[in-house]
C-alpha cells in the first residue's frame, strides 16, 4: 500500500509493504511486510559520517518485517535489518 503524497523512484517495493504519507524513497529495496511510516526518507540523504558502504551503488535496504517510525531517515547505502542499522 502506498499512501497519498508518497514519492517512490527507482525502487523495489515487495508485497505487503506499506509506505506512509509524504514519504520519499529513492533507489531502495523495501522488504516484504515492511512498514515505512509517514514522513520517512529512504535513500535521499547522504550520511556525512559514513566511511564505507554496506550496500553499494547508492541502494538503501529496509528488510522485510521492519517498521520505520514516523519521520525516520535511512541514508543512501544504509541497510536496516532486525539486527539494527548497517552502513559500514
Image (cartoon, rainbow, N blue to C red):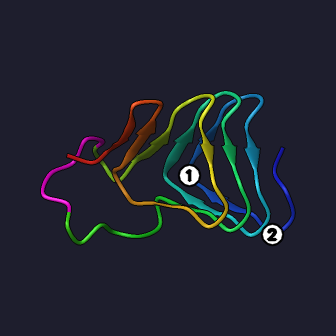
Q: Position of residue 34 (x, y in %)?
A: 66, 36
Residue 75, position in %: x, y? 40, 60
Which residue is situated farthest in the left direction here? 51
SS at mark 1 in the image = loop
Q: Residue at x 67, y 62 (%)?
A: 70
Q: Is residue 15 left or right of residue 81?
A: right
Callout 1: 10 Å neighbours few (<14), some, many (20+)? few
Residues at discs 2 and 1 in contact (Cβ within 8 Å): no
Residue 3: which quarter of the image? bottom right
Q: Which residues are magenta?
A: 50-55
Looking at the rendered structure, the secondary structure element under dot 2 is loop
Which residue is depicted at the point 40% across and 48% down?
A: 59
Mark 2 — residue? 5
Work out whether 84 lies above or below 16. below
State whether the magenta stretch is mostly helix, strand or loop: loop
31 horizontally vs 85: left or right = right
In the displayed structure image, the side of residue 43 where residue 4 appears, left or right: right
Q: Name the quarter where the N terminus is drawn.
A: top right
Task: Report if residue 63 lies within the magenta region.
Answer: no
Q: Position of residue 58 (x, y in %)?
A: 35, 53
Q: Closer to the camera, 64 or 56?
A: 64
Q: Is residue 53 magenta?
A: yes
Q: Residue at x 49, y 52 (%)?
A: 27
Label 2 environment density (alpha carbons within 10 Å; few <14, some 14–19, many ≥20): some
Q: Is residue 54 above or below residue 4?
A: above
Of 28 and 78, nearer the camera is 78
Front label number (2 vs 1):
2
Any mark on residue 45, and which?
A: none
Report the residue marked by disc 1: 10
N-terminal label among 2 and 1 = 2
Amino acid at each position: 500500500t502506498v499512501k497519498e503524497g508518497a514519492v517512490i523512484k527507482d525502487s523495489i517495493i515487495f508485497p505487503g509493504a506499506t509506505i506512509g504519507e509524504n514519504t520519499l524513497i529513492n533507489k531502495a529495496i523495501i522488504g516484504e511486510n515492511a512498514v515505512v511510516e509517514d514522513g520517512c526518507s529512504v535513500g535521499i540523504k547522504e550520511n556525512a559520517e559514513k566511511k564505507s558502504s554496506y550496500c553499494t551503488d547508492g541502494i538503501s535496504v529496509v528488510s522485510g518485517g521492519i517498521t520505520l517510525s514516523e519521520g525516520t531517515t535511512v541514508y543512501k547505502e544504509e541497510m536496516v535489518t532486525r539486527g539494527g542499522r548497517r552502513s559500514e
